[in-house]
Image: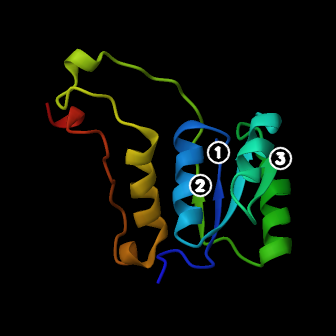
Amino acid sequence: MKRLMNKVIVLTGAASGIGFASARACHGEGAIVVLTDIDADAGKLASRSLPSSEFISLDSRNDSAWDGVLDSVLDRYGRIDALVNNPGIGIRKGIEKHPLGRLGQPHDIAQGVVFLASDESSFMTGAELVIDGAYSAR
C-alpha cells in the first residue's frame, strides 16, 4: 500500500527544485497534492505533470494570501494532512567542502518529506530531521 494514500498535502515552492521533487514523491505515494508557488506559469506546468494534482498561485510571504489558499483547500478537500513550507532560498556552497563530495539533490530531501507526511512519523514530535549529507556533522 502507498504510504500517503489520499492524504491532502499542500506544498509551497512546488514549481521546481525541492518543492517539485517533494510534490512528485508525495504524489507517487498516493497523496492528493496541492502545489503552490509565486511562479504561476511554472506551477501550472508542474501541476500538469502530476495527474489529479492542482496548482494555486501563492506568494508565501503574504499572510493574507495564505488565508485564500488554506480556505480553498479546506473547502475542496475538507482537511489538510500535511503542509510543506518550502520557500526557495538559493543557497549554494562549494562541493569540495562537502563531506560527501556532492551537493544534495531535490530527491534527497523529498524522501524526508514523504517520511514526515506519512504515518511512519506519527510518534515523532518536537524533533528536527536533518538531511544535509553530514555537512552539519563536520
Against 41, residue 46 (above or below) is: below
Contact, mark 1 vs mark 2 (Cβ under 8 Å): yes
Say what amino acid the circle numbered 1 marks. Answer: Ala
Question: Alpha carbon of mark 3 to alpha carbon of mark 2: how far?
Answer: 24 Å
Against 120, residue 44 (above or below) is: above
Against 6, residue 16 (above or below) is: above
Residue 137: percent from the left, percent from the top? 16, 37
Which residue is at a point 46% across and 57% down the rendered structure image?
A: 113
Residue 67: percent from the left, percent from the top? 81, 55
Among the 4 quarters of the image, the one containing residue 111: bottom left
In terms of secondary structure, where does tag 1 sit? loop
Question: Alpha carbon of mark 1 to alpha carbon of mark 2: how far?
Answer: 7 Å
Who is closer to the viewer here, 77 or 104? 104
Who is closer to the viewer here, 8 or 124? 8
Please identify the quadrant where the C terminus is shown. top left
Q: Which mark is residue 14?
A: 1
In terms of secondary structure, where does tag 2 sit? helix
Say what amino acid the circle numbered 2 marks. Answer: Ala
Which residue is tagged 2?
23
| Mark 3 or mark 1, earlier in chain | 1
Residue 132: percent from the left, percent from the top? 29, 39
